Image (cartoon, grey):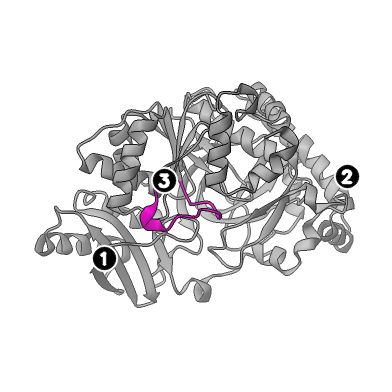
Amino acid sequence: MIPDKRLIYDNCPEVVKNMIGFGLRRFPRFRWRPTKEETIYFESLVKTEYAPTDVLKRLQCSKLKKLINHAAVHVPYYRKLFNERGLRPEDFQSLDDLQKLPLLTKEMIRANPDDFLSNEICDRATLTKITTGGSTGTPMQYYFDAHMIGVRRATWWRWSMFAGIELYADRMIYCGGAPQNWIYPPEDFSGLVNYERNQLFLSSAAMSNKVLDRYIEDMKKFKGDYIRGYASGTYMLAHRVIEKGLVLPMKAVLTSSDTLFPQYRDTIEKAFSCKVYDHYGQNEDILTATECGVSPGLHVNMESCIAETVNEKGEPVLGTEGKFVSTHLENFVTPLIRYVVGDVGILDSSSKKCECGRHHQKILSFTGRDDEIIVTPEGRRIGCGSMNQPMKTMHSSIQRCQFVQESINLLKVKIIPTDAWADSVHRVELEANIRMQVGDKIGLEIEKVKDIPARENGKYQFIVSKISSKKKRTVSE
């Protein structure tokens, strides 16, 4: 393999990549290394790591002006919007001026996807297509250039740095969704070593005990330094490690992609004898944030994101629960300005320095996805964080749980019990715990199951709402 054959290599099945990487593992120049764009952006992040809040906001404002100037001229949607509203790029001189623009929803992008692509792009073949998971509707496609790919990877590099991991030296065990060209049926899943990247890949798509036991043996042989993966998949792996009476020490565990519940964190830290560092992001990378490990909350990557929260009317709120809205400052290929992320939570309203020494704005808490909310007959809206409460005292008797709201009057609870489950005792306890969250008006059905399938992307959905499309309220522009 030579550098100009990279595209061929990237499109090979995993088993072929593995064979190529195995053959080249002794040649340092072919090993996984940061790109030029990634290195440049990471070095800029290092410079602003402990910058004061006013410096970070001035940097955001400077980048916003450049993005607005570009979008108003080269992006059809924004060019039309500016003309209709009588706006000019010079009207945006501060971060507060963002309020002059309406919120941008996924539905608006789905209706006219090409209107959000910069007309400076002559050849889409030079771009990387980014596809969302489609859990909230039809999957959407965005495009990243080499710079945006570098920005994404640099924020992951920062995440690793927070955790004390040397990204391009330490051996990683990755626990996440199976790649599209994965050729094995779920019952035959086993760890796959990527020699080029010095990684062990464990698919979270079908974690039966049989598969998990194979993964544990693979981990022992691989001798990884740290784990990175989906919070739910990593938790299930950790749960099995503990069930087998084992401890597999790691430097750190880096979780992302779905909710890291308190019992997930406790189980993972016990199984791997290390701290967990959570990361928040999306396929679009519109809003990213990382735990520092010193105090609660996740630091927003202010160098690339302007984070907001808004209420149901689309009005800005801070320090209280709201819908996350963000503007990415580095994506000039498909600019997304005041984009409604789809998650609900709380942004810190203060500008106090964190105990870790950083001044970056914090995400204080997550309620969950806006379309993964239980709605009771009396109109209460309850998210993942609250529905996780009943599980806190029951994780020794329940291996996994999923809430499925079939109708406004019926909530089904699927559980995979452990050997410690005693039906006469734990069923009563579970129902009482759930009632404390949802009240007495909604019907409850508790069902013991052998498996709770993951979605196609390998993530496990904690709340499945079959009424969300009927109940969802649109955000005002």
- Residue 360 visible within the image: no
Query: Answer yes or no: do the residues labelled 2 and 3 have beta carbons within 8 Å?
Result: no
Q: Earlier in the sequence, mark 1 or mark 2?
A: 2
Write the residue at 24% across / 40% down: 242
Q: Which residue is mark 2?
A: 90
In space, the residues marked 3 and 1 are separated at their CA atoms by: 21 Å
Q: CA distance from mark 2 to mark 3?
A: 43 Å
- Residue 187 covered by magenta stretch: yes
**SS at mark 2?**
helix
The answer to whether residue 222 is visible is yes
Which residue lies under the disc numbered 3? 231
Whether label 1 touches label 2, CB < 8 Å:
no
Please state which of residues 70 and 475 is positioned toward the viewer in this rendering. 70
Query: Residue 367's spot in the image, x, y percent?
Result: 45, 53
- The answer to which of marks 2 and 3 sits earlier in the sequence is 2
Which amino acid type corresponds to the residue marked 1 in the rendered image?
Val
Q: Nearer the viewer, mark 3 or mark 1?
A: 1
Residue 201 location, x and y as percent?
46, 41
Image: 347 above or below 358 = below
Q: Which label number is shown at residue 449?
A: 1
Q: How many marks?
A: 3
Magenta highlight: main SS: loop
Tell me the kind of residue under disc 2: Glu
Instruction: Name the amino acid, label 3.
Output: Ala
- Magenta stretch bounds: 176-190
Residue 197 in the image: state x and y as whole percent.
55, 33
* Picture quarter with the C terminus: bottom right
The picture places residue 449, in percent across and down from the top left corner, at 26, 65
Q: CA distance from mark 1 to mark 2?
A: 60 Å
